[in-house]
Amino acid sequence: MTTAKSIRKTVSAVLARTTVVDIHTHLFDSALGPLLLWGIDELLTYHYLVAECFRARPDMEYPAFFTMSKSRQADLIWSELFCKRSPISEACRGVLTVLQALGLDPNEASLAAYRRYFAGQTGRGYVDKVFKLAGISRVYMTNDPLNPEERTAWEKGFKRDPRFLGVLRLDSALMAWPKGAETLKGIGYDVDSSLSGQTLAEVRRYLDDWCRRLDARYMAISLPPSFRYPAATHSLTNLMIKAVFPVARERGIPVAMMIGVKKLVNPALGDAGDSVGKADIATLEQIAGDFPDNRFLATYLSRENMHELCVAARKFKNITPFGCWWFLNNPSLIREITAMRLELLGLSFIPQHSDARVLDQLIYKWIHSRAIIGDVLADKYEDLIRAGRRVTEADITRDIRMLFDGARLQPN
Ligand code: RAT
Ligand code: ZN
């Protein structure tokens, strides 16, 4: 039996040997070739670090950066954020953790040694290594059939790596309707800019076809803070309730809604130019209540919404909160959000996803998150022991599996 004294050690040992399922990444099966990013240049040009580079170099014009080659950008970011000052931010610290875990010295003045190391790695072998270091068994991709490169690869077909699960991402098709209608038309769906019965039926056919082709385990969309339901005059709301939810229900898969992103508040920053806004939790509550046969994975970008999400999940069993998304994926906030969820929801949520865009990021995102989540869990077990409850290693193993095995994403 575990005592309050040894609990921290036990929790971290159990966490270290439990592999996790990462339910939201932007990674790809290595059979999809160049779509899977990895290596030092990709790590350093992660959009989180691009934004930070402009903090260090406010004198630099945006185009001056974006017209540089990727390796020049990486050199600049290394010099500005890692050499001229201490790499304190979470995104910077992440790069150090990756280098250290790979056995590299994170104190190099230039990137030459790192580039030599990564040049010696090969696709599938490197995936094995990273999964092992990150303690991961499976990752969910973010698949967009409207990306021509991706669509061509799926249409051609390839032998899938069972560790990379498909997720149909909806943003490009549905967000800026009727913009997506043009593209859907171009790939054989008879839609027009209206939301007539015929168009909705064709959107459903698109979703169904591509869920089947990808073997999609859920459908996902990122939504602005202004997203509202009921507001059936809004085309996005209509597409969600009349196309996405019915298809998800028929297929027995969840819909992931990632809410609160204000796209391109600074367009000059590209991927790094999005911001956060507070959304209206009543929308999710009403959706969960009106569509009780659908399952919803939900995360928000604003800290305040994350508290409201816990309350909403207590009211609606078809809501599963997941992850600490993007600007919330920082140690102080992960700690706060995880504690709050354990207190309000017990073990009925998915504590974290990596959002990795670069394979190697899995290493740091999971090393960092495991440490914090382990700490918070240990606090909670200590509280149980203080209240006279016995806690065994087997209990802890069962609970941690429950949090990280992705069972809530299994099809109905
Ligand atoms: O965290 C990020 O990298 C964001 O740019 C987004 O990818 C976000 O996670 C999303 O999936 O929309
Ligand atoms: Zn993402």
Image (cartoon, rainbow, N blue to C red):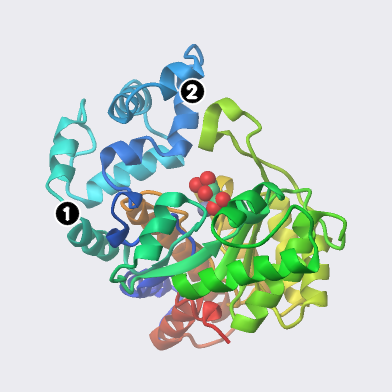
Tell which of 104 and 67 is nearer to you.
67
Question: Residue at (18%, 44%) from the top-left corner?
Answer: 118
Q: Which of 385 and 229 is in front in this view?
A: 229
Could you say which is closer to the camera, residue 43 or residue 66? 66
Residue in the image at 48% along x and 51% along y? 147
In the rendered image, residue 172, in percent from the top left (x then y), is placed at 59, 51
Residue type at tag 1: Thr
Please say if 36 is above or below 41.
below
Horizontal and vertical percent for residue 76?
33, 23
> For mark 2, what is the residue?
54
Q: Residue at x 35, y 73 (%)?
A: 19
SS assignment at label 2: helix
Q: Is residue 154 left or right of residue 315?
A: left
Q: Identify the residue at the far top of this view.
A: 59
For label 1, the SS is loop
Q: Residues within 10 Å of mark 2 (few under 14, many from 20)?
A: some
Residue at figure coordinates x 52%, y 75% from the top left: 381
Image side of residue 78 versus residue 397, left or right:
left
Picture quadrant of residue 104: top left
Total numbered circles: 2
List x then y, in percent, for residue 165: 42, 70
* Residue placed under numbered mark 1 in the picture: 122
Q: In this view, does 49 lie to the left or right of 33?
A: right
